[in-house]
Image: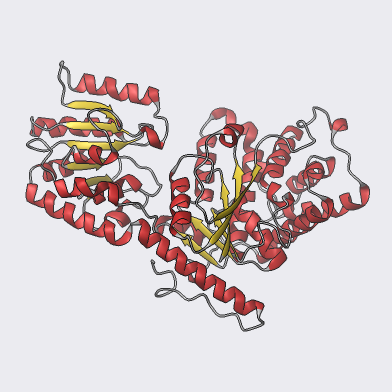
Amino acid sequence: MRVALLTEGGYPYAQGESVAWCDRLLHGLPEHDFEVLALSRGRQQELGPRRPLPANVRGVHTAPLWGPPQGIAAWPGTPRAWARVARAPARRFAECFAELVAALCPGYQPLGEAQPARQADRFAEGLYGLADLAARHGGLSTWLYSEHAVRALEAACRAPGAPRAVHGARVADLLAVAERLERALRPLSLGWYEAEGPGAGELCHAVGAGPAALAGLIARHRYGTPLLITEYGVRLREHYLASAAAHAVPRSAAGAPVRALLAAFQVRLAREAYRRAALITPGDTTARRWQERCGAEPARLRTVYPGLDARPFRAAAEAGSARGSAPPALVWVGRAGPGKGLAGLLHAFHAVRAAEPAARLRIVGTPARGRPDAGYLARCRALAARLFPGPAGPVTFTEVGGADVPTLADAYAAGGVVVFPGADSGFPLPLIEAMFCARATVAADAGAVAEVVGGTGLVVPPGDRRALADACLALLRDPARRARLGAAARARALDLFTVERNVAAFDAIYRELGRTARSAAAGLAREPIPAAGRPGERV
């Protein structure tokens, strides 16, 4: 099967779990041919190293979502310098762009509320109208950098019923929104959609419901190509969290119209992607709930957990907890930074130490997963020195790759209880690694933690230091329970979270979508996509 894999800021460019997942998927499906259509987020990413490509990748086609478009240096400083465009196609552009931006303002509904059908239709009409214009005239950048775009945005912001946040939009705000929309809409102008082009495969598989999915929407619009969307971190949720953080900054009031319009665009684009996708595969229940709130039909949602390679952790699992002290050490593994809960863990360990003077805590950094926050890590070291004074304290800081901890598996094997105190909302991949190592775990109940653990570890309320300390003490004092939970955790991880299971699920999905598409192309009645169980059931 010929599959167009659509990525944004990921494979084959950068490091990160979505990149590793794409890599495992491509290597695990040698019987399928892939064209990788990659959108990059920055110059450094494009110039950086790439992943080695497996033989079944027929080509990699890249395009930037950063910097000014070709032929336009930057936004001009005065309205008189705005780009000039031909009148006839400009009128059609103005009509389509007005439809799209009108859907961002009148009758705007917050996330989770019912979306008027007409609003969705206006966004779709504007979007696909712009796509057709881009195909006929070689792109949209000049128009999106023109006075027509700014006037359409201004009219939408002043229309009756527009959100209060956009009423006061200034010219600078409108220029900023137009520039950001030009970048987000660049996939409409790419040469990926010709009949024999890289985007004309039998299936488009988008990693996320943002601009990458937009490329799949265009292939569906032109050729009826089925669109599959996989999200292991819901882009729209991340956008809302970032927007909420920006609102907390006092100076952010000046950018309120920009944030409101861009958030509305993200909502409309996600809803359109979910509306048109043949199938959506969230990575956990948290992602699924957000997708449902954005209008995804439950019958077209099927949870497919991310898959990890269990082989590197086999030796640690077989070694059991013999390498710990008595009682065994607590260990934290990850990239240090805000949200990881290290300060709370140190305070909780202070209570653990008072009850069990022999207990130790090992904090192990993983540079391969990103650069740690040096300032945050320094504050944690200072807190540890203050809580546990003395030349040989019970808390040690180290990194994977050193003499003490050569490999990631060694990090988990260094303790009998692995602790995850952070409130990160993403999928807890380090927790699965600890489960592969047959380690008992204590984790804060955030994101998909409870779903992943499934009763094989202890889950505590986020930020509750007393509960965290009590859970750690309970496992430190009960070696039989540690061993029982560790064995159950490994069995659960091997059953649900291996790369083999993940790849097999997508292989089956590819074949199902291919059969459905061929039946539709042959003029047969389109049947519902078959599922491994009830609609929405996990694969």
Determine the residue located farthest toward the top in the rendered image.
Answer: 391
Residue shown at 52%/49% (left/top)? 235
> Residue 464 is drawn in which quadrant?
top left
Viewer-proximal residue, 206 or 242? 206
Specify whether 475 is left or right of 176: left
- For residue 125, above or below residue 45: below
- For residue 321, above or below residue 196: above
Specify whether 163 is left or right of 464: right
Determine the residue located farthest toward the bottom in the rendered image.
Answer: 524
Residue shown at 43%/45% (left/top)? 17
Viewer-proximal residue, 375 or 15? 15
Q: How is the image coloured?
A: secondary structure
Image quadrant holding the N terminus, namely bottom right
Specify whether 502 is left or right of 453: right
Determine the residue located farthest toward the right in the rendered image.
Answer: 87
Viewer-proximal residue, 497 or 161? 497
Residue shown at 17%/55% (left/top)? 487
Which percent across, then down, holds residue 110?
A: 57, 53
Determine the residue located farthest toward the front in the rendered image.
Answer: 55
How many labels sit on residues?
A: 0
Which percent across, then down, holds residue 125?
A: 74, 61
- For residue 448, above or below residue 381: below
Residue shown at 16%/22% (left/top)? 393
Which percent across, then down, holds residue 493?
A: 28, 56
Image quadrant holding the C terminus, namely bottom left
> Residue 83 is drawn in which quadrant?
top right
> Residue 466 is drawn in which quadrant?
top left
Which percent across, then down, holds residue 260?
A: 63, 44
- For residue 467, above or below residue 374: below
